[in-house]
Image (spheres, helix red, strand yellow):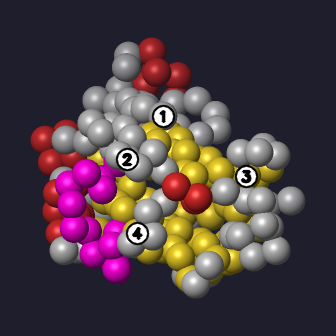
Amino acid sequence: MAISLEKGQRIDLTKGKAGLSKLLIGLGWDPVSAGGGFLGKLFGGGGANIDCDASVLMLDNDKFTEKKNLIYFGHLKSSCGSVKHTGDNLTGDGEGDDEQILVDLTKVPSHINKLVFVVNIYDCVRRKQDFGMIQNAFIRVVDQSKNEELVKYNLKENYSGKTSLIAAEIYRQGSEWKFAAVGEGTNDTRLEELIRRYA
C-alpha cells in the first residue's frame, strides 16, 4: 500500500528494496469547474483550458548547470536516458495521471544528486490563470516493475495567485534515493524563472 505524505515529509525510496530502479512519477490535477453548473457547461463558460506542464530539473550538487538537464514537453528525454517525459497533456481533464515521467535510477549520472519535479501553467499571464484554479493536485511514485504505488503526496494547500509549483524532489543520499514532498508555490510565470532558483 502506498505511503501518503504531507508537505515537508521525506521517505526512503530504495532502502530495503534492492531491485528498485525503474520509477513512474505520475502528476495529476483537475481544473476547478468554471462557469458552474449545467448552464456553464451548456454555454461553455470558463475561458481557455488550464495547460499545466510538468518538468524535471536534473541538479548537479543542487545546481542547475546545463540546459540539457531540463526535461519538459520540448525536450522529452535526458541524453543519459535516465529521465523520460511521456508527453504533454493540454487540459488536465480525466481521471488518474495527467502527465508521467519515467526515471531509471541506475542510469542517473553520478554527478546528478537531485531530480526536482515542477509544474507551471503555460501562458499563465496572458490567460490570467493561477493554481487557485486547480484542484486535486498530486504527485505519486510507482515501482514500474511491480506496477505498485509506493508514495503519494496530495498538494492540498491553497495555491491561489501562485503560477508555478515545486512539487517534489527525488534525491541521492549515499547509495540510497529518497523522496521529499516539497509543495512550494511560487510566482514564477515561466519555466526559465523557476530554473533561476537553482542557478
Query: Tag 1 or tag 2, which sits nearer the N-term?
Result: 2
> Relative to residue 88, is residue 66 drawn left or right?
left
Tell me the residue at 45%/45% (across/down).
81
The disc, 2 or 3, on the residue closer to the chain's N-terminal end is 2
Callout 1 amino acid? Thr
Q: What number is the disc on residue 78?
A: 2
Q: Amino acid at mark 4?
A: Ile
According to the picture, the residue beneath numbered tag 1 turns out to be 86
State if disc 1 and disc 4 touch (CB < 8 Å). Answer: no
Image check: 89 left or right of 194?
right
Helix, strand or loop at disc 2? loop
Q: Amino acid at mark 2?
A: Ser
Number of callouts: 4
CB contact under 8 Å: marks 2 and 3: no
Say whether residue 64 is magenta. yes
Separation of residues labelled 4 and 1 (CA atoms): 21 Å
Task: Name the secondary structure under disc 3.
Answer: strand
Residue range corresponding to the magenta coloring: 59-71
**Circle 1: is it few (<14), some (14-19), or many (20+) Cα within 10 Å?**
some
Residue 149, given in percent of the width and then of the height, sits at 76, 53
Q: Is residue 146 above or below residue 58?
A: above
Q: Residue at x 37, y 38 (%)?
A: 76
Which residue is nearer to you in this view: 48 or 97? 97
Q: Is the C-beta separation of discs 3 and 4 under 8 Å?
A: no
Q: Is residue 115 above or below residue 39?
A: below
Q: Quadrant of residue 21?
A: bottom right
Disc 3: which residue: 143
Which of the image's four quarters has the N terminus?
bottom right
